[in-house]
Image (cartoon, rainbow, N blue to C red):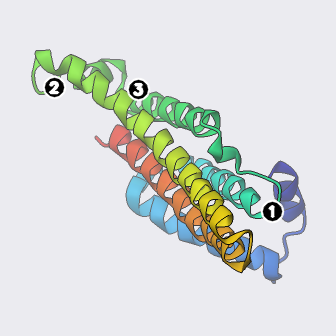
Amino acid sequence: MIVCAIVIVRSLRRVPGRLQGFFEIVYELFGGIVRETLGKHANRHLPTIITLFFFIWISNLIGVIPTLSEPTRDVNVPFGQMLVMIFIVHFEAIRVKGIRSYIKEYFEPFFIMFPLNVIGEVAKGVSLSFRLFGNISGGAIIILVVSYLFKYLVLPVGLNLFFGIFVGTVQAFVFTMLAMTYIAAAVAE
């Protein structure tokens, strides 16, 4: 991804070619969504959101290539992405609100809600990572079962393309949008 980004940046033209046009469309799509969701904090997080989407999307597309499996099928990859996003969410909450207001939110609306609020934060992160892991692994299991039923005919190949491209794209988008929503909630004043 880094090499592609360097090549694309070095080949930028005033009149875009196909590749530059594609990335400009993606940038504008995400830019609009991020600006609408994060408001004045959008420019700070737009590169992170776009990079997160492309990382997950490319990881999911790798499974379309025969004999390769998606990195997101290993629970450690979505879990690692979740840890990074949760770190960003809490870092931004502290940066925007200050440490005192950040800690105070855990005790709202009542003092005894502190444990539930902490559990809620942990659950948010766990559900974010397991949603991606479960959907990608579930697609792989369905393809495996259908492949054994039809002995590797055309149907499993079509299913592999469907799960790899369509479902992989949707899951990358969902993970990215949820991460952006968590950031938006954290920086809301």
State whether residue 164 appears in this view: no
- Tell me residue 173's x, y (percent): 52, 60
Q: Which residue is pictured at 47% across the width and 57% down the height?
A: 174
Three-letter amino acid code at the position of disc 1? Ile
- Tell me residue 14's x, y (percent): 81, 79
Decide: marks 1, 3 in contact (CB < 8 A)?
no
- Tell me residue 76's x, y (percent): 63, 33
Q: How busy is the neighbourhood of tag 2: few (under 14 within 10 Å), some, or many (20 plus)?
A: few
Decide: marks 2, 1 in contact (CB < 8 A)?
no
Mark number, residue 94: 3
**C-alpha gap between disc 3 and disc 2:** 16 Å
Mark in front: 2 vs 1 = 1
Three-letter amino acid code at the position of disc 3? Ile
Q: In which image quadrant can residue 156 be found?
A: bottom right
**C-alpha gap between disc 1 and disc 3:** 42 Å
Question: 142 or 62, which lies in front?
Answer: 142
Q: Looking at the image, is mark 2 or mark 1 earlier in the sequence?
A: 1
Mark number, residue 125: none
Q: Secondary structure at mark 3?
A: helix
Q: Which residue is denoted by mark 1 in the rendering?
A: 65
Q: Looking at the image, is mark 3 or mark 2 earlier in the sequence?
A: 3
**C-alpha gap between disc 2 and disc 1:** 49 Å
Q: Which residue is denoted by mark 2 in the rendering?
A: 108
Mark in front: 1 vs 3 = 1
Q: Secondary structure at mark 2?
A: loop
Q: Which residue is pictured at 43% across the width and 35% down the height?
A: 125
